[in-house]
Image (cartoon, grey):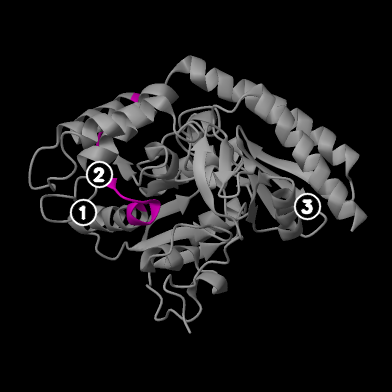
Amino acid sequence: MIASVLPTYNRAPLNFVKGEGSWLIEADGRRFLDLGAGIAVNALGHAHPALVQALTDQAQNLWHVSNLYQIPQQQALADKLVEHTFADTVFFTNSGTEACELAVKMARKYFFDKGEEQRIEILTFDGSFHGRSSAGIAAAGSEKMVKGFGPVLPGFVHLTFGDLDGVSDAITDQTAAILIEPIQGEGGIRQVPDADMKALRALCDEHGLLLILDEVQCGVGRTGKLFAHEWAGITPDIMMVAKGIGGGFPLGAVLATEDAASGMTAGTHGSTYGGNPLGCAVGSAVLDIVTDPEFLAEVNRKAGLLRQKLEGLIATHPDVFEEVRGSGLMLGLKCKALNIDVVNAGYDNQVITVPAAENVIRLLPPLNLSDDDIADALTRLDKAATQISAA
């Protein structure tokens, strides 16, 4: 008999009832150090007072009116994003998946309006993850994502991650855009080198293509800058954002230049809940904190401390771990043991990590975790690794 909740997840036998900062409290009272942060969503941890206050204040006034009307909270958050990024305009969604759908539509509409209707193809990369909608799974293209869900939406060309020559060779008069994550999350914390990011930007400029960045997981301060592409000194034309931007409240966005968004006029796209007063009030509070240079400096300092300690963990347990990957507080431990065994051993030692491809576990802690939290994390990961070695 099927469960009342559609059984599409392999859920761990944990029932969390409360969150405090970097910690989750199970129904039985156990405290778990959360190095997953809801898969990079709880950027400021659990029950951050500024976010609780923003949500409470807004909830007492107005939850929803729809985009048939002006929404001051939406305007305020859009203005902040435009101020702090490359973007001239913002469309708010509820998720990264919805952001992907709009990014694809925006790129194709851009060329349609220029009389180049044949330019519909978007170049994507193996190991990518862009959500689970029809466009998202077609963009990723892996058998795991698309099997059983055909016919797959056409218009995506799948390339080898890291092969710049392959990108250049794949560009034709049908190519509209390149879509890439600066750091692949689901793909195993695989980072695009700064030089490659610059080269992709140059290819787009040379061929008149749009560069679409998926910063759903790596954005909003996670790498120590507001957005990961800033490390390479380049800007996209379109960018997908979600996860951390709402600090735990469902919120996403597509950011774009005026030129890239020129085809998206009244009636070309919409969302019932996207940009509602509740979500935007919380998102605005998140952005006020995360855009503070002192906050980002602390992210970088803590990232260096955590990475140093993880290197020591690898040296202590070379039979369990192989290398550290990633940037800022978006880190991965490539495992020699099965990554899911490491995740489960973590549960036994009350520390939460997230599995990914290439036998990697992801460490995506709240950006404001403390130094004591970092020390505690290493103690628990060390115990988990010792448990695996002894098994």
Badge 2 element: strand
From what the image shows, is residue 375 above or below residue 386? above
Give the residue type at disc 3: Cys
Q: Position of residue 93 (x, y in %)?
A: 29, 49
Q: Position of residue 388 (x, y in %)?
A: 85, 54
Q: Are marks 1 and 2 in contact (CB under 8 Å)?
A: yes
Q: What is the quadrant of residue 371 in the picture? A: top right
Q: Quadrant of the C terminus?
A: bottom right
Sequence-wise, the earlier of marks 1 and 3 is 1
The segment highlighted magenta reads 84-99
Q: Position of residue 306 (x, y in %)?
A: 70, 30
Sequence-wise, the earlier of marks 2 and 3 is 2
From what the image shows, is residue 265 above or below residue 197? below
Badge 1 element: loop
User: Which residue is nearer to you in this view: 339 or 378?
Assistant: 378
Is disc 2 surrounded by few (<14), some (14 to 19) or many (20+) residues within 10 Å? Answer: many
Task: Give left or right: position of 247 versus 369.
Answer: left
Badge 3 element: strand
Task: Measure the alpha-carbon separation of dots 2 and 3.
Answer: 39 Å
Q: Nearer the viewer, mark 1 or mark 2?
A: 1
Q: Is residue 34 visible?
A: no
At a point 64% along the width and 44% down the height, the residue shown is 30
Looking at the rendered structure, which numbered label has been put on residue 271? 1
From what the image shows, is residue 96 above or below residue 23? below
The residue labelled by disc 2 is 91
Looking at the rendered structure, which numbered label has been put on residue 335? 3
Task: Give left or right: position of 177 versus 20.
Answer: left
Q: Is residue 325 visible?
A: yes
Outermost residue, top direction?
294
Is disc 1 surrounded by few (<14), some (14 to 19) or many (20+) residues within 10 Å? Answer: some
